[in-house]
Image (spheres, rainbow, N blue to C red):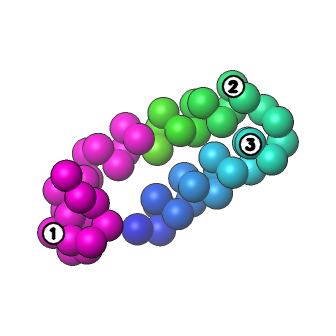
Amino acid sequence: MQAILADHRRILAAIAAHDAPAAQQALRDHLSGTLLVADAIRQRHPGYITD
């Protein structure tokens, strides 16, 4: 969960800095990592991810 929050911080920082390429890359990195652990997140926190 800490890694996901860190990803969100990186995305927001890039947006705040008006750095679109960095924001896009941070979002891609975040989504790739989140997809890998989505099932584990769903099991631990069923209300976080809905179909």
CA neighbours of label 1 inside 10 A, class few (<14), some (14 to 19), many (20+):
few
Task: Give the x, y percent position of residue 10.
Answer: 65, 50
Instruction: Give the residue displayed 37% in from the left and 38% down from the top.
Output: 32
Residue denoted by label 2: 21
Residue 18 lies in quadrant:
top right
Question: Outermost residue toward the right?
Answer: 17
The label shown at residue 17 is none
Disc with the residue nearer the chain's start (2 vs 1): 2
* Residue type, mark 1 in image: Gln
The label shown at residue 43 is 1
- Would you place residue 14 above or below residue 40 in this image? above
Q: Are marks 1 and 3 in contact (CB under 8 Å)?
A: no
Q: Are marks 2 and 3 in contact (CB under 8 Å)?
A: no
The segment highlighted magenta reads: 31-51
- Secondary structure, mark 1, is helix
Instruction: Give the residue displayed 19% in from the left and 52% down from the top.
Output: 51
Would you say residue 14 sits in the magenta stretch? no
CA neighbours of label 3 inside 10 A, class few (<14), some (14 to 19), many (20+):
some
* Residue type, mark 3 in image: Ile
Instruction: Give the residue displayed 29% in from the left and 44% down from the top.
Output: 35
Residue denoted by label 3: 15
Would you say residue 43 sits in the magenta stretch? yes
- Secondary structure, mark 3, is helix
Residue 44 lies in quadrant:
bottom left
Q: Nearer the viewer, residue 6 or 31?
A: 31
Task: Give the x, y percent position of residue 2.
Answer: 47, 68
